[in-house]
Image (cartoon, rainbow, N blue to C red):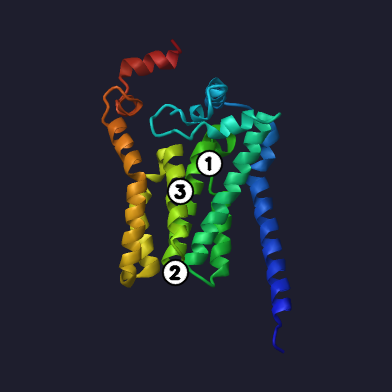
Amino acid sequence: MTETPAVRGRRLGAGLASDGTFYVVLLLLVWGLTVPKRGLWQDDTLLLRRARDFQGHGFLAAFTPVVTPSRRLYSLPCRLALATPQPIWTMHLLFGAVWLGQALAAGWICRLLMPGKRLTRFLAICLTLTATSDYLTNNLTAIGYNISAFMLLLAIGCSLRYMQGGGAGWIVLTCAAASVSIWTIDVAIPALPFVPLILFWCGGTEAWRRVLLLLSALGLTLAHAAQVEWQFLHDPASYAAVALVPMRLADRFVRTLGF
């Protein structure tokens, strides 16, 4: 007996609902159960204080760099949270939403690269939801890292949609998501060199024109960020220079004693 479109649609909807319920349960097990018992770390309070300092100084104050010159969107979640009656709970909920978004974006990429492999997509989402560490689940500071990773995944997904015949709007979305990722925090930089490989895997060498157009748009979009990052890494007085200097034994001893 041939399955009608209506029956097929109901079956697909039921499957998506059951998968979605399972994803939410995983999210609660990995992240949500510890939220009521979780306090603020030092970095969390520092970010909230910086965000509060920006209040009343106009819209552009929200894009003031934090620690490094490329982290211009890093304090934006705190700014948004402070605009609500419960900023701490707002940040927790935003954290969970971004966490789930990362997993769904990973599943989207998997579906674009391997269409029809529903089990593979399901496992990709589940593994992304559960691939974590105590630092990420216990520290609201990681919300900036998660947002950056989430936007990078969205940028990759949008680029794959363009490679599969999508219009120029997908290029715009790719560049926008990549920009938000880089200007939040620079965790996407090590992954960017692999983007051309993914594009060629998806489109093949015969789609080189689309690859070239997409990469050119990305390059122009991120050129200023690359310049800022290069100057930051080569500034002897910057945070990066200090972070890479080995700590002397005497300094370790003094810090261990708590002086």
Q: Secondary structure at mark 3?
A: helix
Give the CA separation, mark 2 to mark 1: 38 Å
Q: Work out whether 131 lies above or below 116.
A: above
- The residue where tag 1 is placed is 133
Q: Please give left or right for residue 81 compared with residue 228 in the image.
A: right
Q: 10 Å neighbourhood of mark 1: few (<14), some, or many (≥20)?
A: few
Q: Please give left or right for residue 114 compared with residue 82 in the image.
A: left
Give the CA separation, mark 2 to mark 3: 19 Å
Total numbered circles? 3
Give the CA separation, mark 3 to mark 1: 29 Å
Q: Secondary structure at mark 1?
A: loop
Q: Work out whether 139 lies above or below 222.
A: above
Q: Earlier in the sequence, mark 2 or mark 1?
A: 1
Label placed on residue 165:
2
Q: Amino acid at mark 3?
A: Ala
Residue 243 position, x and y percent, is 34, 27
Q: Nearer the viewer, mark 2 or mark 1?
A: 2
| Of the pair 3 and 212, the residue shown nearer to us | 212
Q: 10 Å neighbourhood of mark 2: few (<14), some, or many (≥20)?
A: few
| Of the pair 72 and 126, the residue shown nearer to us | 72
- The residue where tag 3 is placed is 176
**Residue sitting at x 47%, y 48%:** 177
| Of the pair 243 and 154, the residue shown nearer to us | 154
Q: Amino acid at mark 1?
A: Ser
Q: Nearer the viewer, mark 3 or mark 1?
A: 3
